[in-house]
Amino acid sequence: MEEDKVPQDDANVLDGKLKVLKYAVDKDGKYTKVKTVGWEPENIVLSQAWDEINEKVEEIKKRVLAGELSPIAYYMEKQMLDVKMLSGYVGYASFRVKWHLKPRNFKKLSEKQLDKYAYAFRITREQLLNIE
């Protein structure tokens, strides 16, 4: 694609606050870097992906509020972490993190353990305990 033909569609998912780096051919036929706010098909796909992510976060939140999962599950989903990634952040084995996803086990966590999770999620302990 030629440098002057790189799409600059304004309907960006991030309201034009973020530009993406693309490569295009300049007037001399050499590849050059061009910043773009995106193009319509790309923006549509990104918007749909974020909608799906947000729906899943809300679904997990409902399950936490219903007492099916611990708040750890909500923040994991919200920050797009899996058990293995979170276990690395908090320094617990994966099976312990899975164990803490159960509300009855979450209620038994010490303040120190809660603080580890809160720090990993970059929230306060109070936010971890009260997701509403």
Image (tube, rainbow, N blue to C red):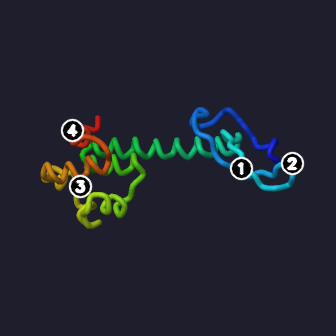
Q: Going from the N terminus, do you reach mark 3 or mark 1 first? A: 1
Q: How far apart in space, not on screen, are marks 3 and 1 (Cα)?
A: 48 Å
Residue at point 77% right, 43% down?
Answer: 6
Residue at point 26% right, 38% down?
Answer: 127
Q: Going from the N terminus, do you reach mark 1 or mark 4 first? A: 1
Residue type, mark 1 in image: Lys
Which residue is the site of mark 2? 27
**Residue 92: percent from left, percent from top:** 24, 63
Q: How far apart in space, not on screen, are marks 2 and 4 (Cα)?
A: 57 Å
Q: Is disc 3 surrounded by few (<14), some (14 to 19) or many (20+) residues within 10 Å?
A: some
Q: Which mark is residue 102?
A: 3
Q: Which mark is residue 33?
A: 1
- Which quarter of the rendering shows the C terminus? top left
Which residue is the site of mark 4? 126
Q: In this view, does 19 lie to the left or right of 70?
A: right
Front position in the image: 69 or 92: 92
> SS for tag 1?
strand
Q: What is the quadrant of residue 131 in the picture? A: top left
**Residue 113: percent from left, percent from top:** 18, 54
Residue type, mark 3 in image: Lys
Front position in the image: 71 or 60: 71
Q: Going from the N terminus, do you reach mark 2 or mark 3 first? A: 2
Residue type, mark 4 in image: Glu
The answer to whether the residue labelled 2 contacts the one labelled 1, judged by CB atoms less than 8 Å apart, is: no
**Residue 50: percent from left, percent from top:** 52, 43
Q: Going from the N terminus, do you reach mark 2 or mark 1 first? A: 2
Q: How far apart in space, not on screen, are marks 2 and 3 (Cα)?
A: 60 Å
